[in-house]
């Protein structure tokens, strides 16, 4: 807004409209109605500051401009696993995890250690140390991990490395579990 228009607007608006929290927020307030007309009215062909003042909609901008904000990246659907292939890989991974964690549980003494698998969800309870939940997310073709150490993670199958990888950090599912379980239980585990 030009410096010439601001003093004219200040004279036309009551001072309350320029406060952070105007006192006159009721819809029947004249300042509110004028302010609404100012923003929503079609452009004034004279270009003057007559009443009601009109702003050219092409002059209004509510964005930060091109190239400043980026939206979500496009999904390459060609790189997604076919549903059958996803189920085979995810089921195989979760079943192998279950077997290795059961073997690990036989050799470690932790109160409350328990492994449960049902409805495609693997739950590892480590007593007071926390609970891990690992499950498949078929629509996303991901394995989701809820960890008491690192929080939630979503792992995608990486065809090149043939591993479940968390794209945000590059972490490998099995290596992450190995390091976290070692730090919690103080006994190494071999999952990969």
Image (spheres, grey):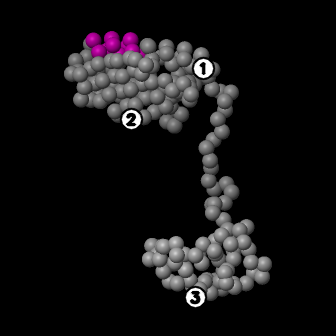
- Was residue 101 drawn as part of the magenta stretch in this picture? yes
Residue at the right extreme, as displayed: 45
Element on which disc 3 rests: helix
Sequence-wise, the earlier of marks 3 and 2 is 3
C-beta proximity under 8 Å, tags 3 and 2? no
Q: Position of residue 170 (x, y in %)?
A: 51, 32
From the image, tell me which residue sits under label 2. 150
Q: CA distance from mark 2 to mark 1?
A: 28 Å
| Majority SS type along the magenta span | helix
Image quadrant for the C terminus? top left
Q: Report the span colored magenta.
A: 97-106
Q: CA distance from mark 1 to mark 3?
A: 66 Å
**Residue 171: in sight, yes or no?**
no
Residue plotted at (40% across, 17% down): 118
- Dot 2 surroundings within 10 Å: few (below 14), some, or many (20 or more)? few
C-beta proximity under 8 Å, tags 1 and 3? no
């Amino acid at each position: 807004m030009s410096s010439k228009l601001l003093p004219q607007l200040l004279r036309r608006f009551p001072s309350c409209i320029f406060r952070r929290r105007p006192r006159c927020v009721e819809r029947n307030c004249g300042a509110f109605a004028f302010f609404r007309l100012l923003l929503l009215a079609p452009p004034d062909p004279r270009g003057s500051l007559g009443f009601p003042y009109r702003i050219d909609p092409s002059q209004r901008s509510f964005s930060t401009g091109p190239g400043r904000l980026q939206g979500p990246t496009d999904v390459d659907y060609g790189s997604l696993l076919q549903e059958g292939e996803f189920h085979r890989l995810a089921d195989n991974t979760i079943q192998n995890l279950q077997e290795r964690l059961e073997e690990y549980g036989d050799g470690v003494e932790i109160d409350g250690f328990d492994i449960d698998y049902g409805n495609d969800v693997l739950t590892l309870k480590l007593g007071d140390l926390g609970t891990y939940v690992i499950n498949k997310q078929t629509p996303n073709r991901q394995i989701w991990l809820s960890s008491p150490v690192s929080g939630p993670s979503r792992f995608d199958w990486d065809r090149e490395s043939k591993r479940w990888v968390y794209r945000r950090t590059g972490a490998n599912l099995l290596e992450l579990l190995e390091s976290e379980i070692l730090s919690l239980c103080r006994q190494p585990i071999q999952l990969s």
